[in-house]
Image (cartoon, rainbow, N blue to C red):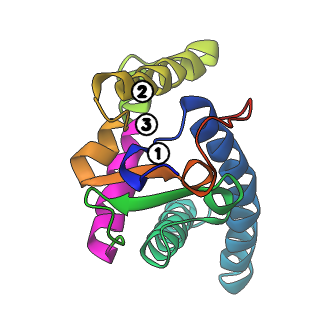
C-alpha cells in the first residue's frame, strides 16, 4: 500500500479527469443557462448576457466548492479516483475549496487577458490561452510533490486513490 502523501496522480490522469469534468460541466451549464433564460424570459442572446455570465460563474463556484468540501471529489474525480485533500491529508474546508477554485482560474484568465490586450483575432485568440494552459500545466514539474501551482498556493493537494488502494508494483497504463 502507498501512503496518501506519496500517491500523486500523473499528469495524464489529471488531464483525463479534466476532460471528463468538462463534458459533465457542459450539461450543468446548459441546464443552468436554460433555467436562467426561462425564468427571466430571455429572448435575445445579448439581453442580460452579463447577468447570465455571473449566474453561470456562481453555478460553477457552487458546484466545485460543494463537491470539494463534501468529500474532496467531483463526479469526474470519483471516476478517475482522485481526491482533493489539505497538505496534511485532512478534509478540505469551504474556505480552502473556494481559494483553490479562484486560483484555478489562472489556468485560463492570464491567456485570455493577454489575447484581449493584444487585440487577438481568429486563431491567435485560441493559441494564446492554449499556450497559457500548457505553461500552467508545466508548473507540476516545479513542485517536488508534483502538485500544480494553484494547489500549492491554496494549501491543497490531489492524491491518487487508485494507488492507495492497491499493492505496490501493479500499475496500469493510465496512471
Q: Which residues are magenta?
A: 93-108
Q: Position of residue 106 (x, y in %)?
A: 36, 39
Residue 107 vs residue 80, the one in the foreground = 80
Residue 155 higher or lower than 128, as above or below: below
Residue 65 higher or lower than 161, as above or below: below
Q: Provide the residue designation for mark 2.
A: 111
CA gap, disc 1 to disc 3? 23 Å
Residue 121 vs residue 98, the one in the foreground = 98
Q: Residue at x 48, y 74 (%)?
A: 62
Q: Return the mark for residue 141.
A: none
Q: Position of residue 69 (x, y in %)?
A: 42, 75
User: Is residue 100 in the magenta section?
Assistant: yes
Closer to the N terminus: mark 1 or mark 3?
1
Q: Residue at x 61, y 48 (%)?
A: 167
Mark 1 or mark 3: which is in front?
A: 1
Q: Residue at x 27, y 56 (%)?
A: 87
Amino acid at each position: 500500500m502507498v501512503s496518501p502523501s506519496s500517491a500523486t496522480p500523473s499528469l495524464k490522469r489529471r488531464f483525463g479527469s479534466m476532460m471528463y469534468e468538462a463534458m459533465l460541466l457542459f450539461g450543468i451549464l446548459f441546464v443552468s443557462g436554460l433555467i436562467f433564460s426561462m425564468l427571466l424570459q430571455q429572448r435575445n442572446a445579448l439581453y442580460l448576457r452579463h447577468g447570465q455570465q455571473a449566474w453561470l460563474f456562481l453555478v460553477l463556484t457552487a458546484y466545485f466548492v460543494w463537491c470539494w468540501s463534501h468529500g474532496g471529489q467531483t463526479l469526474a474525480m470519483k471516476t478517475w479516483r482522485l481526491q482533493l485533500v489539505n497538505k496534511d491529508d485532512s478534509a478540505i474546508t469551504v474556505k480552502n475549496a473556494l481559494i483553490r477554485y479562484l486560483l484555478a482560474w489562472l489556468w485560463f484568465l492570464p491567456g485570455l487577458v493577454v489575447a484581449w490586450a493584444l487585440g487577438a483575432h481568429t486563431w491567435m485568440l485560441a493559441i494564446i490561452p492554449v499556450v497559457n494552459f500548457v505553461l500552467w500545466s508545466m508548473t507540476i514539474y516545479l513542485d517536488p510533490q508534483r502538485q500544480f501551482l494553484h494547489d500549492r498556493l491554496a494549501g491543497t493537494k490531489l492524491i491518487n486513490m487508485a494507488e492507495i488502494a492497491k499493492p505496490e508494483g501493479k500499475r496500469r497504463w493510465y496512471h
